[in-house]
Image (spheres, helix red, strand yellow):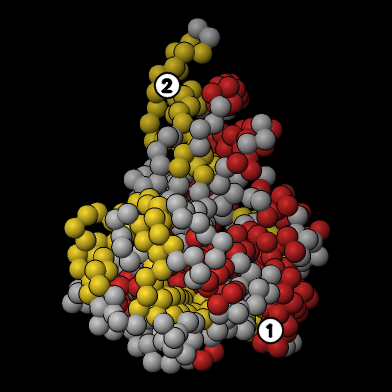
């Protein structure tokens, strides 16, 4: 993969967003910790991220800019800007006013190429506790807001620029334009990072990496594993062995439907119905984390059994994507620990296979665009995210075959309804939750005492934050009636109107 833009991470929650915005410009970039990155000579431009630290903090990041500053086009963002000032003789102090939220540029150096095509009054997003009070002698102010005098500056005689606001968040109305000015006009980076170019390059790399080796891949029915399978299939054909496991916790008819789709795509895929085994492992398990571990353990055992039936397998393919990789190498903060359900981190000892991850450099939206360029069916590419443990974490309390049946029926009515009402594509993720409570109801002349279910639909871009979707009352009314009338064992339907944060998308 050709190196183009290096983003040095100082632990900011926005670092991934910088990378996403750069990628949207059809420019390839990579995120590395500020203290552990490849040789900078491999890159055409460098961006310094923000940080939760102050430049005066005891543990403040101290990047070595040798070989970068004055030699490679450099853009400092927020902490990156303050570090440059602090390091080279300027003055940074705690802000007397709260510099957080929306602001408007009150001054722009019109001749400066960083702000070409950006007008005074453009909205920017501030998020910092310190502010730049005095610039070093050879630093020149190029933008201000009413509250922040040195909102942007450049170092004279260098292609070094810095801004105290965040161009990567959508609240900065011309943020993408500013990044384009820096990367394309100033750094002269080519905009040739496209889905088609990725496919061409990646297929060639996979051919060289894998040769005639056999590869096994666990398909989930989701976007990531599907796109990974098609990429690998293009590279090595029938030397790719796909295994699609039914854990008994999939959506209604999903195992049969998705398996049929895969087989029509020309993939070498084997479907394994292990639903009874999974349900047996989950018998009596109530704790959410123990559920996840039981499901994970059962999957590994089933998958390993099947993999051993294929002789001379060398590689295990995984659908790991870039956010998972970033989380595993992040600088400090909440991202320092790998989540238990992530693929990154290797295999159990008894699975002696090398790992290949064709999508490890892609964000979720890029995975979809790559899939589209390979003509994968829109229905598969447009599927909502679905948790690895499936309905197992949408059934609160213990799991039984009867509870799975109830939730599958409820979920089917809800998801189909969203599609019929043309609402499915407006929702990032949707599903139903079965509560461990019963409520009193009346059906006909009879008193009932049956289960309550929750419907959940959220909008999001990456799952890090999410808002509940304001679905039409008429749709909710129709859906509630269909569920109560059509699903034996349910007499109450509620709609979850909690956003993330403070709630999570899933209930467990």
CA gap, disc 2 and disc 1: 60 Å
Q: Residue at x 27, y 69 (%)?
A: 132
Q: Is residue 363 above or below residue 122?
A: below
Count residues near mark 1 (Cα–Cα under 10 Å), then give few for <14, some for 14-19, many for 20+.
some
- In depth, the one of 279 and 370 nearer the eye is 370
Regarding residue 149, the answer to whether it shows in the image is yes
| Residue 449 badge | 2
- In depth, the one of 433 and 88 nearer the eye is 88
Q: Is residue 231 above or below residue 123?
A: below
| Residue 299 badge | none
Please identify the quarter of the rendering in which residue 292 is found: bottom left
Say how many tags the image has.
2
Regarding residue 302, the answer to whether it shows in the image is no
Q: Is residue 464 above or below residue 267?
A: above
Classify the position of the N terminus by image quarter.
bottom right
Left or right: 102, with 405 as reference point: left
Mark 1 — residue?
A: 205
Left or right: 257, with 363 as reference point: right
Which tag is nearer the camera, tag 2 or tag 1?
Answer: 1
Please identify the quarter of the rendering in which residue 246 is found: bottom right
């Amino acid at each position: 993969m050709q190196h183009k833009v290096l983003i040095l991470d100082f632990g900011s929650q926005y670092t991934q967003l910088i990378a996403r915005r750069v990628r949207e410009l059809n420019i390839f970039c990579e995120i590395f910790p500020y203290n552990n990155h490849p040789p900078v000579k491999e890159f055409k431009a460098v961006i310094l991220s923000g940080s939760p630290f102050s430049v005066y903090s005891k543990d403040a990041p101290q990047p070595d800019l040798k070989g970068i500053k004055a030699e490679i086009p450099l853009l400092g963002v927020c902490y990156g800007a303050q570090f440059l000032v602090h390091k080279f003789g300027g003055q940074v102090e705690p802000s007397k006013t709260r510099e957080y939220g929306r602001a408007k540029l009150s001054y722009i150096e019109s001749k400066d190429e960083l702000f070409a095509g950006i007008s005074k009054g453009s909205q920017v997003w501030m998020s910092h506790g310190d502010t730049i009070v005095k610039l070093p002698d050879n630093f020149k102010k190029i933008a201000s807001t009413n509250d922040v005098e040195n909102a942007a500056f450049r170092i004279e005689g260098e292609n070094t620029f810095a801004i105290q606001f965040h161009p990567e968040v959508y609240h900065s109305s011309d943020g993408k334009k500013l990044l384009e000015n820096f990367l394309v006009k100033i750094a002269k980076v080519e905009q040739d990072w496209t889905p088609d170019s990725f496919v061409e390059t990646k297929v060639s790399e996979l051919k060289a990496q894998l040769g005639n080796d056999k590869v096994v891949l666990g398909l989930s029915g989701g976007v990531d594993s599907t796109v990974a399978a098609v990429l690998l299939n293009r590279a090595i054909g029938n030397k790719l062995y796909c295994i699609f496991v039914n854990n008994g916790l999939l959506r209604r008819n999903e195992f049969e439907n998705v398996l049929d789709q895969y087989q029509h795509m020309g993939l070498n895929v084997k479907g394994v119905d292990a639903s009874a085994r999974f349900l047996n492992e989950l018998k009596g398990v109530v704790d959410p984390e123990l559920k996840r571990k039981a499901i994970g353990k059962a999957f590994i055992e089933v998958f390993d059994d099947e993999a051993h039936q294929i002789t001379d397998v060398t590689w295990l393919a995984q659908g790991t994507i870039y956010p998972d990789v970033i989380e595993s190498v992040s600088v400090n903060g909440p991202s320092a620990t790998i989540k238990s359900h992530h693929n990154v981190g290797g295999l159990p000892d008894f699975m002696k296979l090398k790992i290949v991850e064709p999508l490890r450099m892609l964000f979720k939206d890029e995975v979809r665009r790559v899939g589209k360029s390979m003509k994968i069916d829109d229905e598969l590419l447009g599927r909502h995210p679905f948790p690895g443990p499936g309905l197992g974490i949408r059934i609160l309390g213990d799991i039984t075959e009867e509870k799975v049946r109830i939730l599958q029926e409820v979920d089917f009515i809800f998801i189909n309804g969203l599609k019929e009402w043309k609402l499915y594509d407006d929702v990032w993720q949707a599903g139903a939750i079965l509560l461990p409570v019963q409520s009193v109801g009346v059906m006909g002349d009879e008193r009932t005492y049956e289960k309550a279910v929750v419907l959940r639909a959220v909008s999001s871009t990456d799952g890090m934050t999410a808002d509940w979707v304001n679905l039409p009352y008429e749709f909710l009314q129709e859906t509630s009636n269909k569920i109560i009338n059509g699903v034996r064992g349910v007499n109450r339907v509620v709609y979850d109107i909690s956003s993330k944060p403070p709630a999570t998308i899933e209930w467990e």
